[in-house]
Image: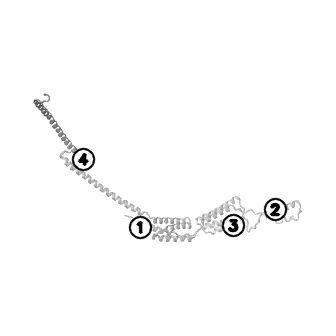
């Protein structure tokens, strides 16, 4: 059969043709590889050149930034030959800048240390200057003693001064500082002197004089003397006169008047002539003068003026006897005025400055000790 047989000539032709085809395809494949390799080498070369130029530009930028502001630095970028020198200069400038920063940092650290030392010293001095609780108590005692002196010499009140000294002694009692022993000893001595000095009841005297002023304002002055008829009520020549209707009527009226007078009127016999009658204006002036005398006595009590006090009350007693002797309330008022005249209004006051001086000495020593303990 001819279909399954292979012809030798045809096999050779096909082999030769396949070989020629493969050889023609291998030639262009080798050329494409060479082109790719050349492109790669060119790309590598371009990248190398670009990287070198970029590195040079970066170095120039760094040097320009480090040496900015220097008029001696050239503006143009250094070439490849001057790159090591520029790097060395930049490094030297950088080191100098770091050294300057180190010196500034050291100066700041030194200044901060000095400020801290000064702050600590001021804090210690302030803490040393602040008094402790015992010193504060002694300072309060000194204030109380100053108030006691003012009360004693301005208001002349020994009771108020004694109360303030007792309060100061209460503050000193719990303190244990041995230096306070002279202070408390002087304080106790001043308290004893005030207790022995006595006191004047200023308020009581003032109120008693005010009550007398009110009572004197209601007194009645001396009345006019009234002449009484004879005891028999009939004239001596009337016995011989004839008695008629009208005579009996007049006699009965006189008898009735005598009985009325005996029941409702009182007749006194004066050893001295009766005082002159006062008009309403004179009576008003007399009352005002009496009130003025009692007001003057009140002021004398407040100011501890013994002489003026007694003279004012004595003059008031004289006016009562001269112009208000007929009022039944006058004897009681006169006795009250005389009793007030004998009351003392000025008492000798003791000296209580010793305790205050001891307190001042203690505070001065304490301040000196705290000033010496404070750091310099």
- Residue that badge 4 annotates: 62
- Residue that badge 3 annotates: 332
Label 3 SS:
helix
Where's the C terminus, which quadrant? bottom left
Mark 4 and mark 2 in contact? Answer it, CB < 8 Å: no
The percent position of residue 163, horizontal first and vertical second, equals: 54, 66
Front residue of 175/199: it is 175
Mark with earlier residue (1, 3): 3
**Mark 3 vs mark 2: in front:** 3
The percent position of residue 259, horizontal first and vertical second, equals: 81, 63
Mark 4 and mark 1 in contact? Answer it, CB < 8 Å: no
Q: Classify mark 4: residues with Cα within 10 Å, few (<14), some (14-19) or many (20+).
A: some
Label 1 SS:
helix
**Mark 4 vs mark 1: in front:** 4
Front residue of 358/321: it is 358
Left or right of 176, for residue 226: right
C-alpha separation, residue under disc 3 versus residue under disc 2: 33 Å
- Residue that badge 2 annotates: 257
In the drawing, what numbered circle is on residue 369?
Answer: 1
Mark with earlier residue (3, 4): 4
The percent position of residue 149, horizontal first and vertical second, equals: 52, 66
C-alpha separation, residue under disc 3 versus residue under disc 4: 121 Å
**Mark 1 vs mark 2: in front:** 1
- Decide: is 101 above or below 334: above
- Decide: is 64 above or below 209: above
C-alpha separation, residue under disc 4 versus residue under disc 1: 66 Å
Q: Where is residue 279, by image quadrant? A: bottom right
Mark with earlier residue (4, 1): 4
Mark 3 and mark 4 in contact? Answer it, CB < 8 Å: no
The percent position of residue 26, horizontal first and vertical second, equals: 14, 35
**Mark 3 vs mark 4: in front:** 4
Label 4 SS:
helix
């Amino acid at each position: 059969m001819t279909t399954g047989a292979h012809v030798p000539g045809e096999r050779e032709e096909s082999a030769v043709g396949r070989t020629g085809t493969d050889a023609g395809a291998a030639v262009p494949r080798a050329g494409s590889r060479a082109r790719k390799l050349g492109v790669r080498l060119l790309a590598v070369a371009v990248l190398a050149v670009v990287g070198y130029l970029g590195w040079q530009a970066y170095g120039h930028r760094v040097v320009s930034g480090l040496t900015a502001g220097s008029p001696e630095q050239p503006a143009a970028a250094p070439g490849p030959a001057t790159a090591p020198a520029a790097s060395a200069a930049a490094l030297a400038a950088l080191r100098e800048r770091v050294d300057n920063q180190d010196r500034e940092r050291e100066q700041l650290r030194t200044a901060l240390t000095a400020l801290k030392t000064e702050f600590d010293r001021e804090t210690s001095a302030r803490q040393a200057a602040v008094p402790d609780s015992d010193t504060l108590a002694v300072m309060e005692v000194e204030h109380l003693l100053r108030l006691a002196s003012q009360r004693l010499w301005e208001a002349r009140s020994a009771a108020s001064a004694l109360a303030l000294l007792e309060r100061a002694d209460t503050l000193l009692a719990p303190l244990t500082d041995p230096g306070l022993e002279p202070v408390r000893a002087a304080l106790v001595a001043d308290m004893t002197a005030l207790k022995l000095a006595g006191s004047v009841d200023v308020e009581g005297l003032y109120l008693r004089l005010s009550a007398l002023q009110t009572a004197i304002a209601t007194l009645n002055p001396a009345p006019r003397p009234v002449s009484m008829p004879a005891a028999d009520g009939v004239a001596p020549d009337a016995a011989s006169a004839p008695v008629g209707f009208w005579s009996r009527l007049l006699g009965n009226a006189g008898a009735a008047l005598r009985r009325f007078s005996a029941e409702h009127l009182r007749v006194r016999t004066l050893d001295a002539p009766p005082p002159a009658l006062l008009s309403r204006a004179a009576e008003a002036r007399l009352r005002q003068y009496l009130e003025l005398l009692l007001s003057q006595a009140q002021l004398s009590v407040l100011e501890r003026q013994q002489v003026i006090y007694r003279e004012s009350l004595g003059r008031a007693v004289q006016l009562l006897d001269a112009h208000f002797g007929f009022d039944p309330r006058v004897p009681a008022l006169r006795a009250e005025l005389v009793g007030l005249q004998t009351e003392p209004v000025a008492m000798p006051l003791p000296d209580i400055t010793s305790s205050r001086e001891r307190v001042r000495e203690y505070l001065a020593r304490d301040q000196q000790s705290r000033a010496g303990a404070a750091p310099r």
